[in-house]
Amino acid sequence: MSDDKVVSLGTKKKSKEENTEENINNTEPVYCSFCGRPNTQVIKMVKGPGVNICSECAMIAVQYLILQDRMPSAEAQHILDAFWGKAR
């Protein structure tokens, strides 16, 4: 599991030496608390205190929050279109 694949939140920043040692000893996958996929099957994983969310579930949550207003801003719509692969 590489440092750039799983981002930890809510923990004390560790030195590079501690991170390297932990990554060697910790090869267990991190699972998304929402969809259940491991970090090996997603783009990124955010690891929080007691909960994890993959980049795909995070984007779905953001899209849901934006669409609650029924009319996303032009900038928000552009980001959503780019994420979902819609060319303008």
Image: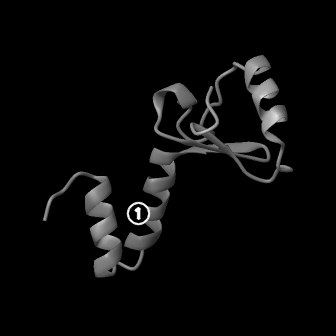
Answer few, some or many: residues within 10 Å of disc 1's Cα (few below 14, many 20 plus, some between 14 and 19): some
Note whether residue 40 is visible.
yes
Query: How far across and how far down the image is residue 84, in percent?
Result: 28, 52
Residue at 47 percent across and 69 percent down: it is 65
Q: How is the image coloured?
A: one colour
Q: Quadrant of residue 63?
A: bottom left
Q: Quadrant of residue 25?
A: top right
- Going by the picture, which residue comes out furthest to the front? 17
| SS category of the residue bearing label 1 | helix
Residue at 42 percent across and 72 percent down: it is 66
Q: Quadrant of the N terminus?
A: top right
The amino acid marked with disc number 1 is: Gln
Residue at 71 percent across and 44 percent down: it is 51
Task: Name the residue beneath numbered marker 1.
Answer: 63
| Along the viewing direction, whichever of 30 and 12 lies nearer the viewer | 12
Query: How far across and how far down the image is residue 72, in percent?
Result: 33, 77
Query: How far across and how far down the image is residue 71, in percent?
Result: 31, 80
| Along the viewing direction, whichever of 58 and 10 lies nearer the viewer | 10
| Along the viewing direction, whichever of 75 and 66 lies nearer the viewer | 75
Vertical relation: 65 (above or below) 13: below
